[in-house]
Image: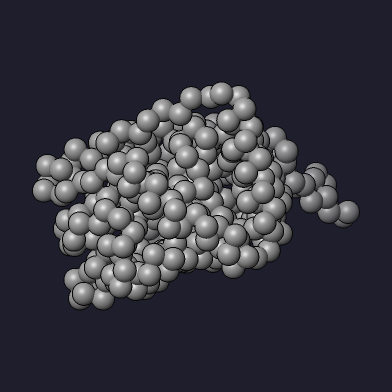
Amino acid sequence: MKHAFWCAALIWLLPVVCYAQTTPLIAASSAAPGSTIKDHFLAFERTLQETFEGDITITLLVDGEAGSEETSLAGLRRGRVHFSAVSVAAAATAVPELSVLVMPYLFDSDQEADFVLDNFIFEPFQTLFTKKGLTLIRWLDSGWAAIYGRKPIVLPKDLAGYRMRAASALTAQAFLESLNADVIPLTFADIIPALQTGLIDGGATSPFMFLTGGLYEHASELTLTRHALNPGTIIANSRWFDSLTPENQSAVKEAYAPSSVLREGTRRQTCESYGILRERGITIRTLTAEQESVWKAAVMPSHQSMVARIGGQADMIYSAIQDGKAAFKALGLLAIPPCE
């Protein structure tokens, strides 16, 4: 390992006295049990210890020690945390335009979404994050949202008046409102108590989180609407990141697994979760093409109102996504059907 030094030359005292300079790095996450995110943070630590030019002290708080995602993000913005994995819903409290990414039926496949995220909107979001004192390092993949509840939910009309938990992202709430559900915004940690008390009867989350978060114990129906993708983010505190040399900035970026690896892990875990959920008595419903068209017809007309509700540069992001979707289609790239 290379070492960096700073030297204080005292005019009246020789020789020059040099002190080793240590860079602190506090990384935080509240990854679900069994998630690959923790493994990637451990690998990140091992790699960075070898590639960082100088002394670095890495503290991993990846079992939720830093609190909820919202708490971790607040610490990140204040510089108490330097590096974190944050869902789009939580990160949107700092960068509201992220809510565009979870608009219903915005993307048609994993492959299309990956192409657009990496080639059309990563740089625009880097600029938006920078304005909030944050540096976007990488996209994660938290999987497609599905609808869960205590009763069968097959068509949008099944949600009318139904008490549904919504994440903090504006578009997650607007999606359920457009279906006339009784929308109750809650953090993920509050879902199970709300299900237990009857405050809510269902919600929307990824199948993997439905399993690992224990939600299936209180809601036995899961419908694979796949209505919204939650990319997730890896973010650094900009003041901390900008204090690093260009070489160490590259080391930090490259030490964490690339988006392609992160996506593959999430998609594999999603497929595995279906089998486990079925073994535990959960009914998993897959929409027919006709049923999916009904869902799209019910919510896609509200896209423009959602963009207006988000505000800021949401219209620019939405337009860039449409350009990316057109480019993906023009390339003739094939979408791989998801597992069920």
Residue 306's spot in the image, x, y percent?
A: 56, 63
User: Where is the C terminus found, in terms of image quarters?
Assistant: top left
In front: 56, or 182?
182
Q: Is residue 14 visible?
A: yes
| Residue lying at 57% horizontally and 34% vertically, measured from the top left | 115
Q: Is residue 218 left or right of residue 256?
A: left
Quarter of the image where one finds residue 143: top left
Front residue of 302 and 142: 302
List x then y, in percent, for residue 248.
66, 38
Any part of residue 60 in sight: no
Q: Is residue 12 left or right of residue 58?
A: right
The image shows residue 144 at horizontal and vertical percentages of 39, 46
The residue under the point 73% across, 38% down is: 246
Q: Quadrant of the N terminus?
A: top right
Q: Residue at x 69, y 53 (%)?
A: 316
- Between 114 and 251, the one lying in front of the other is 114
Residue at the right extreme of this rendering: 11
In the depicted structure, whether residue 14 falls above or below residue 133 = above
Q: Eyeballing the image, is 255 above or below 73?
A: above
Picture residue at 32% right of the left edge, 47% below the top: 291
Place of residue 21 in the rendered image (x, y in percent of width and height, measured from the top left): 66, 47
The image shows a total of numbered marks equal to: 0
Q: Is residue 204 left or right of residue 329?
A: left
Figure colour scheme = one colour
